[in-house]
Amino acid sequence: MLSRFKLQDSGFTLIEVLTVVVIVAILSSISAPIYLRYVKGARASNAQATIGAIYNSSKMYLMDCGEDPASVEELEEFEYLEIDKGTLRQWTFTLIGSDPITQIEGISTSEMKGGAGHVVLFDVETGRFIGYGLPADDDI
């Protein structure tokens, strides 16, 4: 009767369990950095969209006034641009260069979940974004 119970006793061996644990560890070590890169990219996309709006507003300002705006605040003051309050809590934006504007910079504040001090930069001449949440040239 004892031998009948041994035949019905089933389960996983230690080797099988360890094999599964090793496979899960390998998969998580591969996928975690990719996931974190996507999270950074999602956070940076808010700044990218706003920088695009700032760039378009500054071009309209230039066409109307004949000179580049001095600041993002000037664009808002003359109603060429309206930035969402939530975005302004998470990012500060600066125009770099004057006649012509050469770059537009966004710097994260402490309100952003990713932390303060992250920079997203738009180069007007090349039309490219660089910085936080974006792939570096050597990553492409």
Image (tube, rainbow, N blue to C red):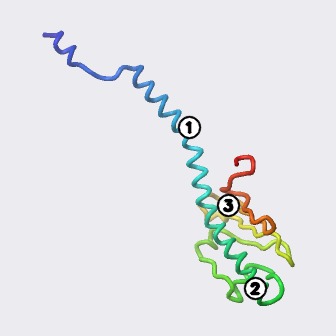
Mark 3 falls on what kind of element? loop
Quarter location, residue 15:
top left
Q: Amino acid at mark 1?
A: Ser
Q: Amino acid at mark 2?
A: Tyr
Q: Which of 8/114 is in front? A: 8
Looking at the image, the residue that sits furthest to the left is 1
Answer with mark 1 or mark 3, whichever residue precedes in sequence: 1
Point out residue 60 in the picture as x, y percentages from the top left corner.
73, 84
Mark 2 falls on what kind of element? helix
Residue that appears at 21% across and 14% down: 7
* Left or right of residue 54: residue 11: left
Point out residue 35 in the picture as x, y percentages from the top left corner.
56, 48
Residue that appears at 75% across and 80% down: 58
Labelled pair 3, 2 in contact (Cβ < 8 Å) = no
Q: CA distance from mark 2 to mark 1?
A: 49 Å
Point out residue 50 in the picture as x, y percentages from the top left corner.
65, 72
Mark 1 lies on residue: 29
Q: Residue 61 bears which disc, if any?
A: 2
Answer with mark 2 or mark 1, whichever residue precedes in sequence: 1
Q: Residue 116 bears which disc, if any?
A: 3
Mark 1 falls on what kind of element? helix
Answer with mark 3 or mark 2, whichever residue precedes in sequence: 2
Point out residue 109 in the picture as x, y percentages from the top left corner.
67, 65
Q: Which of 135/70 is in front? A: 135
Q: Amino acid at mark 3?
A: Ala
Q: Which of 33/63 is in front? A: 63
